[in-house]
Image (cartoon, helix red, strand yellow):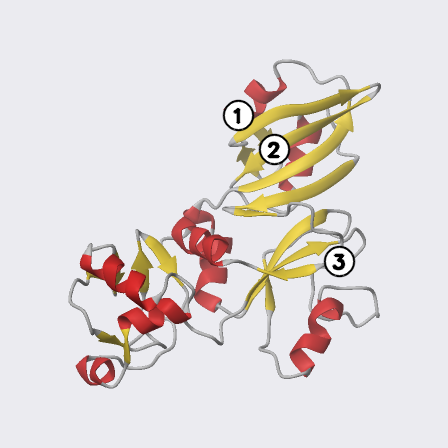
Amino acid sequence: MSERTGRTSGSSAEEEGVRLQKVLAQAGIASRRASEELIAEGRVSVDGKVVREQGRRVDPVNAVIHVDGMRVEIREDIVHLAFNKPKGVLTTMSDDEGRPCVGDYVRERMESGGPRLFHVGRLDADTEGLLLLTNDGDLAHRLMHPSYNVLKTYLAEVPGPVAKDVGKRLRAGVELEDGPASVNSFKLVDSMPGKALVEVVVHEGRKHIVRRLLEAVGYPVQKLVRVAIAGVQLGNQRPGAIRKLNRVEVGNLYNAVGL
């Protein structure tokens, strides 16, 4: 039984499936001829096993395919989006009080026949930046689960100047009201009169974790933007914009959670 779809797969599904090189070509990995070379070189695996024989048929719905160790999403019904959440927008798909929310930005997409999407994790209303949207429940669950230690990068504007020992203190860990917490990395990005821009990388998902950590060491956050999750970068995406993740970004997300 497939963990992802609940459908049964086996030899009969493979016999009736699609040739592996065609699946790779349709997924944009390489041309059919180049895909045959990847298979011959042992760089392609299906359901955890390296495939070298040409003409192997696979179930394009249930098969889990990796090329050079990176997961390839081959299902056309699965959607992965990056949304630059503006400040003041709630991380919900609807709001009974009519306040602006994430659902406002994708409602037309879903009502016009697109899949039902949900957000991966949360950003508080005052925090801007990268929010992932998908209909892949397995991926979303793992990205949010603390055991997978998915790294999230934030840029925070704080009062300046920033003392030299702040990064060391945050990496060592500080005591919060709900237990100790630490950052994976911290660096000063820019310093201006009376304020500074710092980069904070964390793997925790506790509520307001970045704001609470910085306030605990004496630097209350004045502005906070999430700029990366695992291998997905916000880049120059404008606030309110939505874009489809590319193949490498999707592969990085799957790799980050062992899928």
Circle 3: residue type:
Gly
At which x and y percent is residue 72?
38, 62
Check disc 1: other Cα within 10 Å, few if <14, some if 14-19, many if 20+: some
Vertical position of residue 59 compared to residue 164: above or below? below
Give residue 208's quadrant in the image: top right
Circle 1: residue type:
Arg
Q: Is residue 197 visible?
A: yes
At which x and y percent is residue 214?
67, 30
Check disc 3: other Cα within 10 Å, few if <14, some if 14-19, many if 20+: some
**Alpha-carbon span between mark 3 and mark 2:** 23 Å
Check disc 2: other Cα within 10 Å, few if <14, some if 14-19, many if 20+: many
Circle 2: residue type:
Val
Pick whichever, 51 or 78, lies toward us: 51
Q: Which of marks 1 and 3 is nearer the N terminus?
A: 1
Vertical position of residue 159 compared to residue 249: above or below? above
Secondary structure under badge 1? helix
Mark number for residue 240? 3
Q: Which of marks 2 and 1 is nearer the N terminus?
A: 1
Q: Please indicate whether residue 227 sits to the left or right of residue 25 in the image.
A: right
Vertical position of residue 238 compared to residue 74: above or below? above
Secondary structure under badge 3? loop
Q: Please indicate whether residue 215 sits to the left or right of residue 14 in the image.
A: right
Mark number for residue 171? 1
- Image point (73%, 67%), residue name: 105
Secondary structure under badge 2? strand
Mark number for residue 200? 2
- Image point (67%, 83%), residue name: 112
